[in-house]
Amino acid sequence: MNMTTPIEKREFKIVGKSVRRDDVLEKVTGEAEYTGDVKLSGMLHGKIKRAAIAHARIKSIDVSKALAYPGVKAVLTHENVPRVLHYGSPHPRSASCTKDQFILDDRVRFWGEGVAAVAAISEEIADEALDLIEVEYEPLPAVFEPEDAAQPGAPLIHEVGPGGNLVLDPVRINRGDVEAGFAQADFVLEGTFSGGRPHPAYMEPNVCIADWDGSNKLTFWTSTQTSFMVRGILAEVLGLPLTKVRVLVDHMGGGFGAKQDLFQHEFLCALLAKETRRPVKMEFTRHETFVAGRSRHPCKIWLKQGFKNDGTLVARDMKLVYDSGAYGSHGPGVTIVGTTAATSLYRCENVRLEGRCVYTNTPINGAFRGYGVVQSYYALDIQMDEAAERLGMDPAELKLKNVVRAGDIAPSGHPILGHGLEICLQHGIDVLDWKKLRNRDRTPDPRHPHMRTGWGIGCEMHGSSAYPGIKEQGNATVKVNEDGTVTLLTGAAGLGTGAHTALAQIVGEELGVRFEDVGTIHGDTDVVPWDIGAFASHTTYLVGTAAKMAAGKVRAAVLDRAAMKLQVSAAEIDLSEGKVFVIGDPGRCMTVAEAMGPSRGIPAANIVANGTYEPTKSYSFAAHFAEVHVDTETGIVEVKRVIPVHDVGRVIHPIAAQGQIEGGIQQGIGHTLTEDYIIDKKTGRSLNAGLVDYKMPLSMDMPDIETIILEAAPDPGGPWGAKGVGEDPIIAIGPAIANAIHDAIGVRFHHYPITPEDILKALREKGA
Amino acid sequence: MKRIVELIINGEPRDMTVDSCRSLLDALRDDVGLTGTKKGCDVGDCGACTVIVDGEPVNACLMLAVEAEGRTVETIEGLQPGVDVLHPLQDAFMRYGASQCGFCTPGILMMAKKLLDDNPRPTDEDIRFGLSGNICRCTGYTKIFDAIKAAAIEMEAARS
Amino acid sequence: MRRFEYHRADTLEQASRLLTDLGDDTFLFNGGTDLLVEIRERLRRVRHVVDIKQIPGLSDITYDETRGLTFGALVTVGRLENLALVRQRYPNLRAAFASLGSIQVRNRATVVGNVCRASPSADTIPPLIADGAFIHIYSRTNMRVVPLAEFFTGPGKTVLAKGEIVTGITVPPAGDNAGKAYLKHGRRKAMELSTVGVAVSLTMEDGLCNDIRIALGAVGATVLRAPEAEAMLRGTALDAVTVKNAADKAMEECTPISNVRASADYRRDMVGVLTGRAIKQALEAFA
Ligand SMILES: Cc1cc2nc3c(=O)[nH]c(=O)nc-3n(C[C@@H](O)[C@@H](O)[C@H](O)COP(=O)(O)OP(=O)(O)OC[C@H]3O[C@@H](n4cnc5c(N)ncnc54)[C@H](O)[C@@H]3O)c2cc1C
Ligand code: FES
Ligand code: FES
């Protein structure tokens, strides 16, 4: 069931239609070329030697046997790579990052960190050679929990940064007067919350290929969401001008945020290729995607809120500690975004927040869909449910009362223009007949006496764009060809979300040509306009607006040209579906091709325009309604049904938007119930770095999802009011499930994942 | 040690010279140049490498290339019945949004093909069970289920 | 991945010789679904593999009322899973087969390979033990038949001597008075390695339990029987109270460990829950 309630009435030709995506034909035929499919002649294979110790200094490293091994062409260690301190998360416009990484260091900071790299004529030989590299370590004391790392006297993981194993100075936000707020409260709820370490587990393992040509130019294929950032940092670290680094990425097998770091293997691959003067390919094993990839920051949250007896929220005091792992990566961004997000969702005038991010000797945590907010809203939403319980109120009612509304200030500090949370919540309540659901007969089914059912609601909001943390910029170039077709050049990455299709739809709509006539060029930093990268749910909002601006400019130019040929003024004509016609006299018309082409001594037109857009931020909203079944004997929780109600402003491509929501729900169910990348707290070793023991929900585990998208609250900053959708679903589903579990068995959980063991233990404690 | 393996791939007799420890997956991708079949894990967990060998779907990563001697292998590149003709499943996957990043798509399509060949009218449960060895991390499976159901109906209609 | 050599044996004798002649890092290669994973994940040092899939006579499946079900070493899990006979007579085996890995894995994985890998969490072992299966072993000097319950000596360890090869497994016939069940516990519905697996095979006569075998997977160094629990159940009507007490006893009899999949305590709890449920399910045959 899909329901779309239109906002501004307007006839769209392309926008709002699920046109065939430009990338899917190749995908269903197997022709789509992913980075790992690229094969160059003479290509070598690179592999990384990884440390089997969590914290150590390298005393010595002997590569002589590996170098002598037949088929090995080069070996790199910290002794023969450039020593350049650099960022892990390559956001040049973000002020919050600390440079804390070397390509290879004489220090190991987590179990699995690369200490050497080999290039050989086959993957097998490279792999065998790794065993021949002898590393002698001087072990250093290691810390695996942020609490321990933050203790005075804890072993220091980095010499840079604010010290005390902090990745950045604590983020502090104060609004109103928290003490005064608590003084007004009729009751106070206080709790600690914690989140595990979910891993994005995109299906395409990280992979890159480096090739240097005779003019010392590096061509670099890599599966990245941020090709221009990769270009920038590679150039900086390798000491090259940007003209000497070309980054290519066509199809990508997912990223979910995590492929916006600059990874160690990317530098090593480039250097191995430079050293051997042959193309080198480096492809992660699945194990490496865990160990050397990026996961969501584990988080501990302390949350205290004061309420009045009518449900009004009068004070919020919150401390968050994010575990960065061994390097900063996106830790600063995640901490800022996750902490500031907690100013909002449920309105409260008196807010005091403190967010910290701490290094530990564990694998690096990075960007992942929901960027710090998954953690903070899990706490906010669950505590709101608890408040409802305390008040004897329906949680739906209390949430409706408290959700942010028009006029409220966004976490980013500016007023939100399109407010949809109230509408989403109310819509779900109505569609489901929530009152009736809550008052349903709760007697267990006699055939399954140990089974309990529950319903829960989770609310969220999320910004499209990383403003104000990053001043973003979207760019697009649109060209009209002499046959009337149109080429869009964009630097936005194609993670698989259908972003390029949405951009082409926007261009077609704005310009007035058919969707089929818009071609897209992307994925080549030498060709397309600069792009900040695909993240923060912003591509449609940010690059979409830039594309619309560029399309608007070329449209005007086309109209001018047609006006000249039709011998009328541009104001008298219009352009639609590839045809220019005189308003009121559609018989007088010409195709865009005719307008563009040469005629009567006039050469063909060359019409090109750029659009550059520097937005603030829009917010999208969602309320998820979830039904769970809990087996009280085994503790197994099954999510049976989810009704996600989203406001994403104008929907550009309904099926793609639904797909984002459904996929986000799958990941969020995993986070909440089964997924946790586990690091041994004694050694720092990974315990489940594989797809059998890292448990993502699969086909048989998925609930029925009935997506509802409301075009309730468009944001004027996006194309025709469009906003983001990529990250929202993963935020709302978690609390919906946790609240549903409470509804089923009367037990509150403040952490994820909620395991069967947790359920049984809690039931026992409750029974006792 | 290298061996020459003769087999039939997508209806064509082929031979490939491979190291005897190479997987069928690596041989198809690197030696034959059929890169449509994907490697998501190399240990049987994800199903991205699903190909059909002598009529049965298997993980190409868990089979040695030398074992394919004399066998018939079907890959995603052979799913299209004709040059410009798509298999109904391919068409449905495009229309229903069943492919996002597309990395799982070749394996899922091969699995779905086998499912519909054996069971033209699958129930929802049959489809879920049939795909339980194929991880899709993008779609939440909903649209994949929809596409397979739609293709089944279309194929049924085309037969009658 | 490290390289290894591949050998193809045409006879049992040749395979056996290769195993003894090529040295310690030589392994039989059957479906390869364990071996290749162990090689890729560097869990086992392998220099040579000996493929036995060309050896004639190891792919048969036979059934007769006196001897029962016999299948050869090369018979895949998928083939058995889809056999009508297995569905009808051995719902316990069918449940174990259908829960092992994925369809793709089952098209390659053999039951004999699953047994020879001797993982405590292997899904096919508990129901085979509960059914009293026998395993046929070839060696160059003699053939022997060993009750499956005596085949395992520890995690990954069996009574097989160097050069010995399992040729097949026989499962005794399933009578009309038999009830069987296998319940696998994991956090997902598929692609799971068991956290706990419980198999129950029982026979009823005049409303009383004639015989019962309970086999517990993933709660000990090998798949375990629960002899005391079984004794409590024999001769009873398997009423709810007796079953509950026996399930509690089975919890005492198992020796689980804690690992990333579950804690020892939780595994023990599940032995209790699943034993009760498996008995109930086995009794459904008589309903
Ligand atoms: C993705 C995946 C999921 C899985 N899920 C499950 C699951 O849910 N439950 C489960 O129980 N298992 C599971 N497994 C493991 C299962 O596939 C194997 O245990 C399989 O049954 C082994 O059979 P094989 O023929 O592939 O064995 P091989 O890998 O060929 O051999 C396994 C071992 O047995 C030895 N061996 C093989 N045949 C003989 C013989 N005739 N005589 C003596 N020794 C022999 C081999 O030398 C080797 O040591 C899974 C595996 C994968 C890859
Ligand atoms: S690559 Fe073969 S199953 Fe994942
Ligand atoms: S579409 Fe990306 S994994 Fe399925």
Image (cartoon, grey):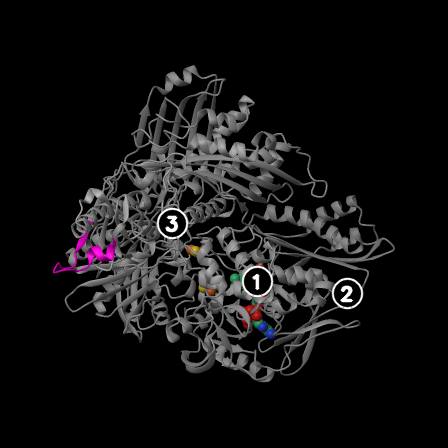
* Position of the N terminus of chain C by quadrant: bottom left
Q: Say which of marks 2 and 3 sits in front.
A: 3
Q: Is mark 1 within 8 Å of ligand 3?
A: no
Task: Answer few, some or many: residues within 10 Å of disc 1's Cα (few below 14, many 20 plus, some between 14 and 19).
Answer: few
Q: Disc 1 marks which amino acid?
A: Ala
- Furthest toward the left, the residue is A601
Foreground: A657 or B53? Answer: A657
Vertical order, C157 against A8 (above or below): below
- Mark 3 sits on what residue? A256
Q: Is-magenta flag for residue B20?
A: no
Q: Are the residues tagged 2 and 1 within 8 Å (C-beta)?
A: no
Where residue A493 is drawn, which disc sits there? none
Answer whether residue A234 is visible to the viewer in this image: no
Where is residue B45 shown, x and y percent of the image? 49, 60
Q: Is residue B51 left or right of residue C287?
A: left
Q: Secondary structure at mark 1?
A: helix
Q: Is residue A563 left or right of residue A407?
A: left
Q: Say which of marks 3 and 1 sits in front.
A: 1
Q: Name the chain letter of the residue that bears numbered label 1.
A: B
Q: Disc 2 marks which amino acid?
A: Ala
Q: Name the chain letter of the residue that bears numbered label 2.
A: C
- Mark 2 sits on what residue? C174
Q: Is residue A210 left or right of residue A255?
A: left
Q: What residue span does the magenta drawing correspond to?
A: A590-609
Q: Is mark 2 within 8 Å of ligand 1?
A: no
Q: Is mark 3 within 8 Å of ligand 3?
A: no
Q: Name which quarter of the figure residue A103 lies in.
A: bottom left
Q: CA distance from mark 2 to mark 3?
A: 52 Å
Q: Secondary structure at mark 2?
A: loop
Where is residue B140 shown, x and y percent of the image? 48, 50
- Mark 1 sits on what residue? B157
